[in-house]
C-alpha cells in the first residue's frame, strides 16, 4: 500500500524552516550561559524573532541582559535571517559537493523573490560572495576606528557585531542608547549607513551593477531602485533637517556638521535599518509620521530589509500617475511595466495594510499607550526596522505576541504568508466583463 506523502509548497516550506530556526534561537537564548539573569520564554522568543527577522526591536537591553555568548547567538540569527536560511543551505550543499535539486531551487526562488528559476543558484553564489566581501571590508575599517578606543579584543568584537547587524539591516547595537554617542562621527555614520543601504538595496541590484558595464544596459528594476533610493533619501534628509532644526531634544544643540550627519542618518535608517543617532521618541510629530511612511515602504526586493518594498510603492505611484494622465500603460525609462506587477504591488500593499490595521486594533485594546506610539511600533515591526519610541519592553504578553507575528509577516512577506495559508489556483473559467462604478 502506497503511503501518502505530505507535500509542502515552497512558501510553506520556507515558513516552516524559518519558524524552526526562530524556536532554536529561542532555546539557545534561554540557556543560563546566554543571559546575565533569567529571561522569560516570551522575551527570549521575542528577541530570537527580532534577530531572525532582522528587525532590532528589543524587550530587554541587549548589552546588559545578554552575555557575550548570548550576543553571538543573536549575531548568528541576524546573519542567517538577513542573508537567508536557504542561502546558507546552498552554501553547505556546495561545500559538500552536492547538486541543488529542483525542489530546492523552487524554495530559493520564493526566498529570494525571483520571477524565474533561471540563474537562481548563480545568484545565491553571488549573494554569498558579495555579503562576506562587503562585511569583511567594513569590519576592517571599523577595526581602525574602535580598536584604539576599546582595545583589540573588544574593538574587533564590536566591529564584527555591528557590521553584521548593519549589513543585514537588523539595528541591534551593543550600547543602550544605540549609536547616539557617535552622532557626529564621520566614520561610524558613513560605514554603518553604507552597510545598511547596500544591504537594503537588494542583491539583484548589486549583481546587476557589478556585471553590467554600461548604465543604459542596467535592468529596469535596478534603475528604479537606484533613482528611487536616491530621491527618497534626499527628500527625507531635507524634511528631517528642516523639521528638527530647532528641536532642543534632537538637532538644536548640535553644530551644523552634526545636524547634517544626524539628518542624513535618520533619513536612511527607517529603510529597515533600525539604528539611531538621536532620540527617536523626542522627534517632532510630523517627523515621526514621515518616518512611519518610510518604514512602511521599506527596502528593496531580494534585500536584507522588510516593508512592502520601494519598487512596490513606486509601481503603485506610477500606476496612479498613468491613470490620471489617461495613459494605457505604465512607462518609465523607455520601458513599460507589466500589468501583473501592478496587481502584485496592490495585493502586497492591501494585505500589509490589513495586517497592520488588525495589529493596531488588537494593541489599542490590550495596551494602555498613546495611539501614535502603538502605530510607530507596529509599522516598525512590519518594516523589520527596529526603531522604537520606547514602549517595546512594557508591552503585555499579548502585545509581544502580536509584534512577533507582525515581524514574521514583514520578513517573510505578505504574499508568502498568504500562499502558505491558501495555495493559489489559476482560474479555468472566464466570465464576461462588466463595468463597476468606482470613485
Image (cartoon, rainbow, N blue to C red):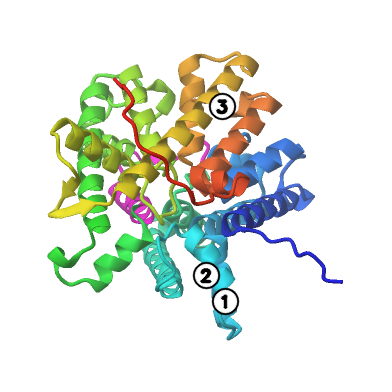
Label ID, residue 101: 1
Viewer-nearest residue: 311 or 269: 311
Label ID, residue 123: none
In the rendered image, which residue does mark 3 sit on?
Answer: 359
Q: Is residue 166 visible?
A: yes
Give the x, y percent position of residue 394: 63, 24
Q: Is residue 276 visible?
A: no
Classify residue 86 by image quadrant: bottom right
As drawn, which residue projects farthest toward the front?
A: 432
Report the side of 358 relative to 44 (left or right). Answer: left
- Callout 2–callout 3 Cβ contact below 8 Å: no
Circle 2: element type? helix
Report the side of 351 relative to 66 (left or right). Answer: left
> Is residue 13 inside the magenta stretch?
no
In the rendered image, which residue does mark 2 sit on?
Answer: 105
Q: Quadrant of the N terminus?
A: bottom right
| Residue drawn at point x = 25 percent, y = 66 percent | 209
Mark 2 and mark 1: span between their CA atoms?
A: 6 Å
Q: Vertically, is 403 above or below 147?
A: above
Viewer-nearest residue: 339 or 207: 339
Report the side of 422 relative to 384 (left or right). Answer: right
Q: Vertically, is 111 above or below 211?
A: above
Q: Few, some or many C-alpha atoms within 10 Å of disc 1 (few <14, some 14-19, many ≥20)? A: few
- Callout 2–callout 1 Cβ contact below 8 Å: yes
Give the x, y percent position of residue 154: 53, 57
Q: Which residues are magenta?
A: 175-200
Amino acid at each position: 500500500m502506497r503511503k501518502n506523502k505530505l507535500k509542502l509548497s515552497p512558501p510553506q516550506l520556507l515558513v516552516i524552516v524559518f519558524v524552526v530556526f526562530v524556536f532554536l534561537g529561542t532555546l539557545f537564548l534561554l540557556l543560563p550561559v546566554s543571559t546575565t539573569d533569567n529571561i522569560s520564554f516570551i522575551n527570549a522568543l521575542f528577541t530570537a524573532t527580532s534577530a531572525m527577522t532582522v528587525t532590532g526591536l528589543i524587550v530587554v537591553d541587549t548589552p546588559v541582559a545578554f552575555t557575550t555568548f548570548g550576543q553571538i547567538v543573536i549575531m548568528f540569527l541576524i546573519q542567517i535571517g538577513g542573508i537567508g536560511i536557504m542561502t546558507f543551505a546552498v552554501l553547505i550543499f556546495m561545500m559538500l559537493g552536492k547538486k541543488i535539486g529542483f525542489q530546492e531551487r523552487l524554495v530559493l526562488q520564493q526566498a529570494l523573490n525571483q520571477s524565474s528559476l533561471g540563474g537562481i543558484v548563480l545568484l545565491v553564489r553571488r549573494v554569498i560572495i558579495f555579503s562576506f566581501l562587503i562585511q569583511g571590508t567594513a569590519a576592517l575599517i571599523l577595526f581602525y576606528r574602535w580598536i584604539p578606543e576599546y582595545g583589540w579584543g573588544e574593538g574587533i568584537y564590536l566591529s564584527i557585531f555591528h557590521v553584521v547587524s548593519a549589513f543585514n539591516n537588523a539595528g541591534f547595537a551593543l550600547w543602550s542608547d544605540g549609536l547616539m554617542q557617535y552622532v557626529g562621527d564621520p566614520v561610524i555614520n558613513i560605514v554603518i549607513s553604507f552597510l545598511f543601504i547596500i544591504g537594503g538595496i537588494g542583491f539583484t541590484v548589486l549583481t546587476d551593477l557589478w556585471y553590467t558595464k554600461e548604465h543604459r544596459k542596467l535592468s529596469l528594476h535596478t534603475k528604479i531602485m537606484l533613482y528611487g533610493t536616491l530621491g527618497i533619501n534626499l527628500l527625507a534628509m531635507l524634511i528631517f533637517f528642516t523639521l528638527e532644526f530647532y528641536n532642543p531634544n534632537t538637532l538644536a544643540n548640535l553644530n551644523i556638521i552634526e545636524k547634517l550627519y544626524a539628518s542624513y542618518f535618520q533619513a536612511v535608517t527607517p529603510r529597515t535599518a533600525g539604528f539611531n543617532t538621536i532620540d527617536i521618541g523626542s522627534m517632532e510629530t510630523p517627523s515621526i509620521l514621515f518616518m512611519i511612511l518610510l518604514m512602511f515602504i521599506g527596502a528593496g526586493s531580494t534585500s536584507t530589509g522588510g516593508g512592502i518594498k520601494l519598487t512596490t510603492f513606486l509601481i503603485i505611484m506610477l500606476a496612479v500617475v498613468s491613470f490620471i494622465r489617461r495613459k494605457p500603460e505604465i512607462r518609465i525609462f523607455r520601458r513599460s511595466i507589466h500589468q501583473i506587477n501592478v496587481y502584485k504591488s496592490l495585493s502586497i500593499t492591501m494585505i500589509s495594510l490589513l495586517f497592520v490595521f488588525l495589529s493596531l486594533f488588537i494593541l489599542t485594546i490590550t495596551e494602555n499607550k498613546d495611539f501614535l506610539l502603538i502605530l510607530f511600533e507596529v509599522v516598525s515591526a512590519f518594516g523589520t526596522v527596529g526603531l522604537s519610541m520606547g514602549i517595546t519592553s512594557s508591552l503585555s504578553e499579548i502585545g509581544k505576541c502580536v509584534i512577533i507575528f507582525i515581524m514574521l509577516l514583514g520578513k517573510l512577506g505578505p504574499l508568502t504568508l498568504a500562499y502558505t495559508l491558501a495555495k493559489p489556483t489559476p482560474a479555468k473559467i472566464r466570465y464576461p466583463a462588466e463595468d463597476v462604478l468606482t470613485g
